[in-house]
Image (cartoon, grey):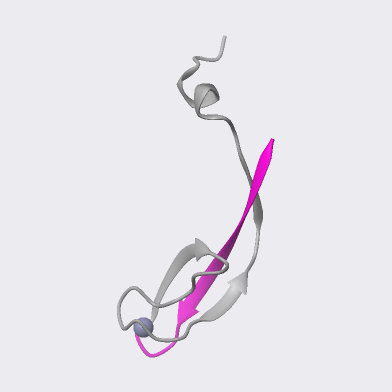
Amino acid sequence: MNYQITAYWFCTPCEVEGRDPEHDLSCWNCGGAVTVTARPVVPQPPPGLLTETPR
Ligand SMILES: [Zn+2]
């Protein structure tokens, strides 16, 4: 199983927050630097698992 590190960030001037891959962080509103608030590692299941109906 693959894992993806996602950075949760907050832009103080804009008062907006977002999520991006940790290597590509910028505010979607102003394009400026952001403050990272968390870096959770989330599993990335294979695409086939997403369409399978649980029984
Ligand atoms: Zn901003």
* SS assignment for the magenta stretch, majority: strand
- In the image, residue 40 above or below residue 8: above
Which one is nearer the viewer's eye here, 51 or 46? 46
Residue 32, percent from left and from top? 39, 86
Tell me what residue is drawn at x 56 percent, y 69 percent.
23
Residue 50, percent from left and from top? 49, 26
Question: Which image quarter is the C terminus in?
Answer: top right
Q: Is residue 37 left or right of residue 52?
A: right
Q: Quadrant of ligand 1?
A: bottom left
Residue 44, percent from left and from top? 59, 40
Which one is nearer the viewer's eye here, 12 or 21? 21
Task: Provide the residue span drawn in magenta.
Answer: 1-14
Which residue extends farthest bottom? Answer: 13
Tell me what residue is drawn at x 50 percent, y 16 percent.
52
Quadrant hosting residue 37: bottom right
Tell me what residue is drawn at x 54 percent, y 67 percent.
8
Which residue extends farthest top? Answer: 55
Please say whether residue 32 is one of the residues in the magenta stretch.
Answer: no
Please say whether residue 12 is one of the residues in the magenta stretch.
Answer: yes
Which residue extends farthest left? Answer: 29
Residue 39, percent from left and from top? 64, 65
